[in-house]
Amino acid sequence: MDEIVCVINSDGTYKGRITYYSLINSKNPAEAVLEDYVILDVDIWENAKRFFAYYENSVHEHVLLPVLNPAGHLISFAFEDGEANREIRMLKELEEQPQALQFRDIYPQYNFVKIHGFHELAYFFAEYLRKQNIGVLTEGEFWKEFFAGDEEEELDYRSLTIYAEGVCGSMKENWVENLLRSVSPEFECIDCIYEANIKEGIIKNTMGDISALEEYLHGTEKEIVIWGTDVTAQNAYEYLLNRGIEAAYFSSNDYEERNRLLFGKKVISLLEMRRKREVVILSPHTKNSVFMGTDYYDYLGFRRNKDIFLLRDYMEIPHNNLNKALANKKILFVGDIYLCERVAGYLTEYTNVMEMIYADVFNQKVKYRETGILRKSDITNVEKDFICLIVMPQIFLYKEGNTYTKKRKEIIGLLKEKGIMNYTDYFSNTSSLVAIEKQLDKKYRRQQLKPKRFILGSIEERCGNSFIKGLLDNHPSILMMSDFSYFNNNLFWYCLRLANLPSEKVLPVFREMYRCESDTDLKDWSIFEKRLEELLEEKERHTSKELFIMFLLSYIRMYGRTSEDISNMVVYWEPHSVKRAEVEEYAGWLKDEDGSCGILNLVRNICAMNGSLLKYENNCYGKVLSVVNHLSYPNIRKKDYKGCERYIVQFENLKLHPQETLSALCQKWEIPWSETLMETTAYGERMSFDNGESQIQDFDPAPVFNNYENYLSEFDRFRLTLICAPYQKKYGYPYVRLSFFTRRELQEMFIKEFRFESKLSYNGEKAKLDAKIRTQEKIRLMLWEARMIEALDAQGKT
């Protein structure tokens, strides 16, 4: 699959190449011949960019570019090393800054530089050195076509030697294995020069403050493109609209986004964007542009803070609910009718929309109770000038996972069939709906349904979810659902859909929804319904937060727990299957103006966390699922929620020093100590946790001291503390600084297999090599991110 047949003319010149994929997608071998190539001349770099940009989304094969000499003979193949784009960008910026520290400032001990081997990065570095009046000695094929080099005394020890192709594993018989390594680490001297300028404040993330950027955008004649189509990109679009700045396009490389419109703006690919050239790209997702986020754009010709801007370097983009973008627009709602009604009610009150209609594209099983906000229409009658809002709950089923993704795909397919290309699922997002609820339910209306405090359990996998629940379960001042049920996972979506319905409709609609959607049943419907009816009778309509408390009280009643006065109680809620970032968004929903809300994060040493997960995967699936899953670490840049305190507890302290750790939590939560905290229970009954080897109960210390030798060697654990150093350092665990090693040393360390990789399974050798290449790409990115965080920490800027 990775072999190439080269087709040569009778005079020895190159005709083209045939690959496995070009052959199987052609009618005959002649049609399968790919004739693109590049000539080794001064235009090779620009010509190569166009080639690789065209094949950027190739997922089937590793793309090679034939390189010919001016006479038309094949002399080499080229492939793309994306990480090297970073150093090329750095060199350009160093040359453009007359006041910048340069090579001689950082490396005064060297009189000249020797470069062995030739490629694009080596060429640009040699050019940079020449402009800095640094002597350059070049060795290797192809240099003479571009760069004569200098006559230097080879015995002069005051030289820096760079092996451009690396010293390990280059020129392998199987060329694809070269993709396991990047040449970027061989040019670490460029990184060091550039970082020195960052530390001195000479090279900065931004061109100025946000007002300077807005002034630039107002004055530019270039078309403005927002990179991405997700909620963050749409929030950026709304922000710009409110500043009188109009974007011309959104951009995405997702194949399914082709021909899509977003607020009437065309969604274009990166290739289309590059062909336009006269554009300004705004990327709303990443920050710290001096380190990352603009390298590939620069490679394509878009310069940092001239043609491409990272918006988060200038500001944190507010969540804004598209009031300006939807003003005076015609809106078509599709999806869950109750959520659609909720969003329509918000738009009616806060946005001047022209018209709103609803089309039931699924013939939903839940019988709709008319509320009168939305007029129903057949989707075939919808005019082209409508914006379609897809509004659906992200219901989680244990057997299927999140049902939203599948249903969204079905809806979009149907919309495209009907010629409706202008759509967004902005209001299917948790943060969007939380923002709506904060406007519609500004406070609790019934004081007797207000607890003292809400605590959200945002605990990563294998960090003690079951353990902390078991400890908190039987505390007389804590209300909680002690299981990991469907009801617990999806309660947010039921509360939002049923909010503000007449009281007499809440229970029958909920019963119908639950039985149509869930994959499990309630323990005892009669007890649950009796208690819920009692609570609903006290008022005609209820806010979503009131419904949350009523559902909670009704649910725990099934398990024999009663609580009439909750004003001095803490509600602990951990929807287990919901993404942790979304769980934390619930803080904005539950936090009241005069109430209290907190987020509990349990953290664990990354080696034990990964070891436990590896054991779980191996026991459940008979194999380890992937390498990358065990190299990443939980997000350490936690979002702040106004008036919401974050409680961080080490899993190890909870196991080894339980009374001290739990007493501190009780004090912070303002609840009394209870001896029930010293045993694990579920609804008052003793419980244990099956860790795959044995039943763990209470404060068994085994999980703390288990090194998981079957999966992680001592060298593996050392490497995890390197690549996950930002996480380890933040939460007080052992870590190793990356700056102790060169980038070449780090690359070679992580080329070696982890012990647990022997438990992976692949569909053939090609699949195995592909997986290894993707893993190394991820590792290189993580190592660079860790280096970035380490550098920012040193400056106090993290």
Image: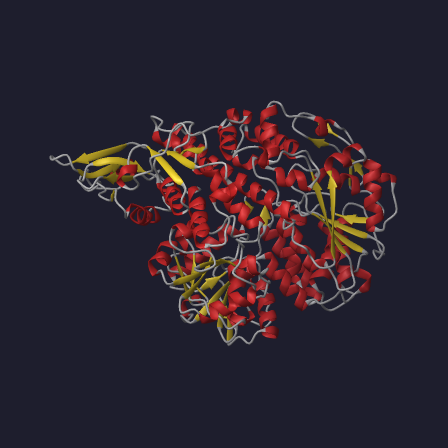
Q: Residue at x 43, y 27 (%)?
A: 168
Q: Is residue 87 left or right of residue 590?
A: left
Indicate whether 254 appears above or below 7: below
Q: Is residue 661 above or below residue 238?
A: above
| Left or right position of 366 against 599 | left
> Residue 338 in the image: x percent, y percent?
59, 63
> Going by the image, does 656 lie left or right of 171?
right
- Viewer-side residue, 726 vs 589: 726
State whether residue 501 appears in this view: no
Q: Position of residue 274 (x, y in %)?
A: 36, 56
Question: Residue at point 29% right, 42% down?
Answer: 146
Q: Quadrant of the N terminus?
A: top left
Could you say which quadrant of the image residue 505 lies in?
bottom right
Locate residue 30, reporting x and y percent. Answer: 17, 40
Q: Nearer the viewer, residue 562 or 610?
A: 610
| Horizontal and vertical percent position of residue 434 | 64, 60
